[in-house]
Amino acid sequence: MTLLMADLDNTLIDRDAAFRTGAVEFLLGHDLPEEDIDWIMQVDASGYAPRTVVAQAIVERYGNGLEAERIIDFLRRGAREHARVTADTVAALARAREAGHRLVIVTNGVVAQQTGKIEFSGLHELVDGWVVSEGVGSRKPEAGIFEAAAAVVGGTLEGAWMIGDRDDADILGAHRLGINSVWLHLDRAWSQPDYAPTHIADTVADAIDHAAGLRD
């Protein structure tokens, strides 16, 4: 058995697309300009901006009696409920499992939010398990979250692979542990001089196939 670990947001699912859909619904539902979606996406910073910061920016921009807590709830719900997995990714996950590999999602974030994305997207039926940083008390690139992922399937990190889009979390974590990694480049150039992924992939399906030994 080889353990294949994969990031969730903007790796297995297009988190930004899901958030964008939810944010557009928010704007339209509050009679706000739909064209402001690009501004919200910039403030959101692919989910790395705290929800309180995003909500406060919206309140300051629009006012209109908007409440920060309701905004936070809506944005979280929208990103969660619109999470989707592409057919190519579904097929690649199936191929990897058929080849005897164990698949575990390794994601930073809040348990309720990240688990919701996994369930709404259907990923809970396509992988062998998942770990969320809040739930295990360790965040990528820390070793603890990767060790927790191995424990989910009763395995070890020996020979394991990590797949993800974040150089400072997914790939750095793998580098520190001395395990293989695949970086999903998303039209970016690798810029870290001190470490590098084992492989760079165009799509998550390609990344899974490579880690599973199904593609050169």
Image (cartoon, rainbow, N blue to C red):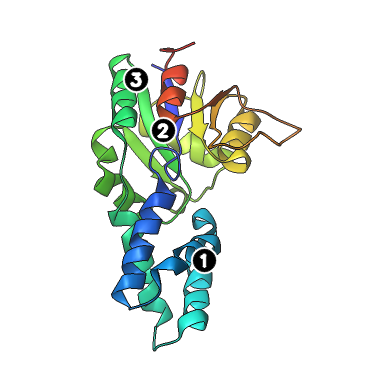
Q: Is residue 118 above or below residue 30?
A: above
Horizontal side of 142 relative to 46 (left or right) equals right
Which of pointers 2 and 3 indicates the residue nearer the eye? 3
Query: Residue 185 location in percent, x, y?
Result: 56, 34
Quickly name the residue at label 2: 151
Quickly name the residue at label 1: 39
What crowding class fits label 1: few (fewer than 14 Cα within 10 Å), some (14-19), or many (20 or more)? few
Which of pointers 1 and 3 indicates the residue nearer the eye? 1
Q: Give the Cα distance between marks 2 and 1.
A: 41 Å
**Counting residues from the N terminus, which is met first, the one under dot 2 or under dot 1?**
1
Q: Is residue 135 visible?
A: no
Q: Nearer the viewer, residue 36 or 81?
A: 36
Query: Residue 120 location in percent, x, y?
Result: 25, 49
Tell me the element at label 3: helix
**Counting residues from the N terminus, which is met first, the one under dot 2 or under dot 3?**
3
Q: Do the CB atoms of the residues marked 2 and 1 lie less than 8 Å apart?
A: no
Q: Residue at x 31, y 45 (%)?
A: 118
Q: Residue at x 38, y 42 (%)?
A: 13
What crowding class fits label 2: few (fewer than 14 Cα within 10 Å), some (14-19), or many (20 or more)? few
Q: Is residue 180 above or below residue 216?
A: below
Q: Do the CB atoms of the residues marked 1 and 3 lie less than 8 Å apart?
A: no
Horizontal side of 74 relative to 173 (left or right) equals left
Which of pointers 2 and 1 indicates the residue nearer the eye? 1
Quarter of the rendering occupied by the N terminus: top left
Residue 96: give its label.
Answer: 3
- Amino acid marked by disc 2: Ala
- Amino acid marked by disc 1: Trp
What crowding class fits label 3: few (fewer than 14 Cα within 10 Å), some (14-19), or many (20 or more)? many
- Amino acid marked by disc 3: Ala
Query: Residue 149 location in percent, x, y?
Result: 43, 35
Tell me the element at label 2: helix
Q: Nearer the viewer, residue 8 or 5?
A: 8
